């Protein structure tokens, strides 16, 4: 069995504002959502890293900003769209996790709700 080393780039607590939500009251008011994004890749830097052989976190942020600029009723759709765009932009990614948090407008005390999206390529060649 061959060892596989992974490098992970993470962006924490990205903040976006918009009318995110299914219910009319959510679409009427601006809601803050936060996102954590984790991207893993197989490092290939025998002499050190450059932007060419890692993941540009500004590029990750720019993609997230574009996706979160779209109004969506469900956080699941935002997570799915973001995952697709990140995999297209960074084909070296072999695993990713996106977690999106929102303070919902609910009838009851709650700090936040979240949606998590996980994806990983078959590192064994499958």
Image (tube, grey):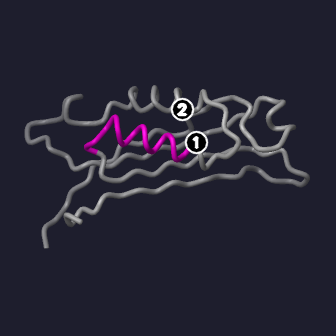
Is the N terminus in the top left, top right, bottom left or bottom right quadrant? bottom left
Q: Name the residue rendered at 59%, 45% in the picture.
A: 77
Q: In this view, does 96 lie to the left or right of 110?
A: left
Mark 2 vs mark 1, CA separation in Å: 7 Å
Q: Residue 72, located in which quarter of the rendered image?
A: top right
Q: Name the residue rendered at 14%, 36% in the picture.
A: 48
Query: Of callouts 2 and 1, which one flags the residue occurring earlier in the amino acid sequence?
Result: 2
Cβ atoms under marks 2 and 1 closer than 8 Å: yes
Judging by the rendered image, the residue that carries numbered circle 1 is 78
Image mark for residue 67: 2
Image mark for residue 101: none
Q: Is residue 62 above or below residue 31?
A: above
Element type where label 2 sits in the image: helix
Residue 75: say if magenta. Answer: no
Residue 87: say if magenta. Answer: yes
Q: Is residue 91 left or right of residue 34?
A: left
Residue closest to the far bottom: 1
Residue closest to the far right: 107
Q: Name the residue rendered at 86%, 54% in the picture.
A: 109
Q: Give the range drawn in magenta.
A: 78-92
Give the prevailing secondary structure in the magenta stretch. Answer: helix
Q: Is residue 45 left or right of residue 13?
A: left
């Amino acid at each position: 069995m061959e060892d596989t080393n992974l490098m992970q780039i993470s962006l924490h607590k990205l903040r976006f504002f918009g009318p995110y939500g299914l219910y009319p009251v959510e679409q009427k008011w601006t809601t803050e959502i936060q996102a954590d994004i984790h991207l893993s890749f197989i490092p290939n830097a025998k002499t050190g890293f450059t932007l060419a052989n890692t993941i540009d976190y500004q590029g990750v942020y720019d993609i997230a900003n574009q996706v979160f600029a779209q109004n969506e009723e469900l956080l699941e759709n935002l997570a799915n769209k973001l995952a697709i765009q990140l995999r297209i932009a960074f084909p070296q990614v072999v695993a990713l996790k996106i977690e999106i948090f929102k303070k919902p407008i609910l009838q009851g005390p709650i700090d936040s709700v979240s949606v998590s999206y996980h994806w990983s390529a078959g590192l064994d060649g499958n």
